[in-house]
Image (cartoon, rainbow, N blue to C red):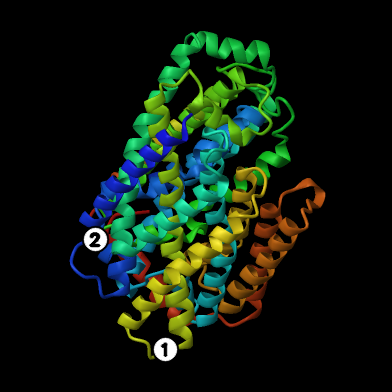
Amino acid sequence: MSNPKAVWLAAVAALILLSYFVPYVLLSDVDAWYGSMLFWTASAAVVIAINAVVSSSWKD
Amino acid sequence: MEATWIWVGVTIYIAIASVTAYLSREGKQTTMSGYFLGNRKMGGFVSAMSYSATTYSAFMLIGLAGLTFSGGVGALGFELIYLCGVTLVLIFGPRFWAVGNRFGYVTPSEMLGHRYDNKTVAVVSAITSCVFLIPYAAVQLAGVGYLMSGMTDGAIGFTSGTILATILAIVFSLVAGLRSVAWTDSLQAIVMVISATLVVIFVIFALGGFGEFFGALRDDHPGALSVPGTGFFTFSTFLGLTLPWIFFSISNPQVSQRLFTPGSMKDLRTMLLGFMIFGFIYTLVSVTWGFAALIEFPELATGDLATPMLLASDLVPTVLGIIVMIGIIAAAVSTIDSIMLTLSSMVTRDVFAVTKPVATETQQLLVGKLALPVIAVLAYLFAQLELDLIAVLSVSASAGLLVMVPPIIGAFFWKRGTAAGATSAVVVSGVMVFYLEFSETRLWGQGSGVWGLLLSVTLFVGVSLATKAPTERAALFLDTVKGKLKEHKAV
């Protein structure tokens, strides 16, 4: 994947897949705010940042 | 809470929103794209707020808070995974926008019909949208009914609330089409995100701060902060809920149609990022409400009562409670009027104009305006059924629209896609989803959306390979996309 934008999009796809895997497999016993709640919140924040980066090149 | 206060709040809201709708008018709209797409000249900020108001409705602050109350933190994951899925706009936003400008599409189904060189595709996807979106609009109406009766202990009935929301949705969309809808949406979104966040601050403070808040959840409600946790969010339930929502931004025409409306690529970017930030805040707010209700009122009969109980409680100042309650009514209205606007544009452009090709733009516009109240009344009748748990019903509508995703993706990425492939995918999978929802069947424990999407992919690919592709049209469409993406430096 030589296109950097494709790498960013792949990162979003990976984060979405991890949003299923991590809470259900790795964090299912962590019953506190720093468990799944933090994971999902942080992942979404990263995805928003990726959107800002990728769309920054759009020109009119 | 006294019914009188609610009525005072509602009256003030109607007055301010009506003035906003009136001021949004810009000359007389005589074309379909002028009325339904704001002349493709919508600014970025209004587009972002309106996109937010259209997406986040009564479902969010009643349904999501309720889902958190019933199932715990899985509700947060569900909604944030949806938000991550909005990244699809990064890919499809510039594409929709480019072909919309080039070919003059008014509706997403019109785009599909043109791309696959077959009007039946447009008719079929327009009708499928109506079948699934009218119940979705009804869900919003039911939200208003629940909220008003919940907050006033039944002094204002379920029916009065739904009638009020129906009338307002008709008025706001008829005044100036998309412009009046977008401006009233923006007003609602801004008031709501501020007041809803204030509620969180008051509630957390009243409950003793974040430490106490999460301590109470951990001690009194084990499982609320993990999945599957209490057992509500099993993995298959979570998958069945999230899958339709990941594709919401391209499967639901009331939001994908918005991709035709921004005035420039810069406006499109502002719309995307503005919406994502708004959604992020709003999601955290709604989930916190649900947890607060769980701590304070663990005995509630249904999750849908979590928000009304919280707003009417001593934790929230009365005036703020009323502002937010009116904001939720406005949220329902802002979703319904956008859906009505989109559906009436589809009925007009993809059904009426196809059956009567000689109709002028003016005639089409008249039919569109007449269709608006008809669609509203249908949604109202559906709302009177008072079906259970708002979130679940709302997701059923999304599961139904999921069947259109393969033909939409194929339109931009697969030149071998054909009209027969698209039509069979939408019709056969749509009927199957309808049957699964209607009969409450869960095949092998999975929701209807999972099966609908699988069948739709299979039919779209299989039937397309067995039939002849519209080579010339596909080349024209895809070359346009390629050229425009290069020109605007998009992926």
Q: Secondary structure at mark 1?
A: loop
Pick whichever, B441 or B239, lies toward us: B441
In the picture, measured across the screen, residue B8 lies left or right of residue B72, that is: left
User: Which of the marked residues, 1 or 2, is nearer the chain's N terminus?
Assistant: 2
Q: To which chain does the residue with label 2 belong? A: B
Q: To which chain does the residue with label 1 belong? A: B
Image mark count: 2
Pick whichever, B373 or A40, lies toward us: B373
Mark 1 is on which residue type? Pro
In x, y percent, where is residue B51? 38, 49
Mark 2 is on which residue type? Lys
Q: Quadrant of residue A32?
A: top right
**Relative vertical location of residue B206 with respect to residue B490 in this rendering, above or below:** above
Pick whichever, B81 or B92, lies toward us: B81
Q: Secondary structure at mark 2?
A: loop
- For the point 77% across and 53% down, the residue is B440
- For the point 27% across and 45% down, the residue is B16
Visible residue check, residue B255: no
Pick whichever, A3 or B468, lies toward us: B468
**Relative vertical location of residue B376 with respect to residue B393 in this rendering, above or below:** below
**Relative vertical location of residue B3 with respect to residue B412 in this rendering, above or below:** above
Residue corresponding to mark 2: B41
- For the point 35% across and 44% down, the residue is B11
Instruction: Name, please, the residue furthest toward the bottom.
Output: B358
Residue corresponding to mark 1: B357
Q: CA distance from mark 1 to mark 2?
A: 27 Å
In x, y percent, where is residue B144? 51, 45
